[in-house]
Amino acid sequence: MDMMFRIITGALLMAAFAAHGAPTPPFSCSYWDKKTDNVETLDDCAVLKDGKLVFLPALFAKTQDVDGMSWVGLYDYTREAGLPDADYYVRGPESYLSVIHFDNGPDWFVEGLVRSRQNGKVGYWDDAFNNHIAAKYDYAWQFQEGKALVCTGCKPQGEGEHIGLGGGEWFYIDKNGQRVSEIKSGPF
């Protein structure tokens, strides 16, 4: 699954370059600096190699490491490529997981899982970057007390900073991805 994730990520990045005239690598990034304890910017953060991201050594010398991971935001690249903001948890130059940009930063691990959007769908990964629940939902919330609210067929509604979701089928899943309860209509 990890190899498939990397192939898909690389293909998406290559398509973005071709379609949107994305910036030329190396890419700049935001990161949490271990000396200043603030979000800083690093100009030479990542490059593309054989269609996939490779994070450069300068990043690892500067970034705060929590539980063997660093947080990196590649906002300039994604915005210029016409893509939504992308946050990553990074363990090494070629070991990373793209996670949902949530509440002005990366989604966080809740009950051992974090959300990631792959091919337009949301699924859940563990802190070793292993896929735990396949990316098959149009949107999914973080787990709470062993279950998470998900939707299929829901669509963004509204404009501006806060966009809601409407329509589709809404239900809760457990940490095995099994449907555990229905709801009559979407909450948003």
Image (cartoon, grey):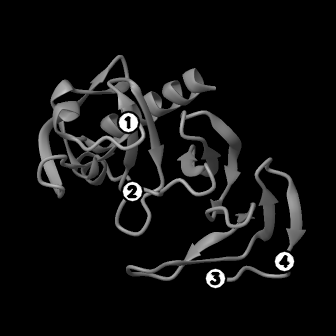
Residue located beneath label 3 in the image: 188
Q: Residue at x 64, y 82 (%)?
A: 188
Earlier in the chain: of badge 2 and badge 4, it is: 2
Residue type beneath disc 1? Val
Q: Which mark is residue 84?
A: 2
Position of residue 121 relative to residue 162, above or below, is above
Residue 68 occupies which quadrant of the picture? Answer: top left
Inspect this view and state whether residue 68 appears. Answer: yes
Whole-angstrom CA distance, mark 1 to mark 4, is 36 Å
Position of residue 145 relative to residue 113, above or below, is below
Q: Are marks 2 and 3 in contact (CB under 8 Å)?
A: no
Inspect this view and state whether residue 25 appears. Answer: no
Whole-angstrom CA distance, mark 1 to mark 3, is 32 Å
Q: Is residue 117 rendered to the left or right of residue 161?
A: right
Q: Residue at x 12, y 54 (%)?
A: 36
Q: Residues within 10 Å of mark 4 (few under 14, many from 20)?
A: few
Earlier in the chain: of badge 1 and badge 4, it is: 1
Q: Which mark is residue 145?
A: none
Q: Is residue 127 rendered to the left or right of residue 87?
A: right
Residue located beneath label 4 in the image: 183
Q: Residues within 10 Å of mark 3 (few under 14, many from 20)?
A: few
Residue type beneath disc 4? Ile
Which secondary structure lies at badge 4?
A: loop
Percent x, y for residue 163? 49, 78
Whole-angstrom CA distance, mark 4 to mark 3, is 12 Å
Residue located beneath label 1 in the image: 90
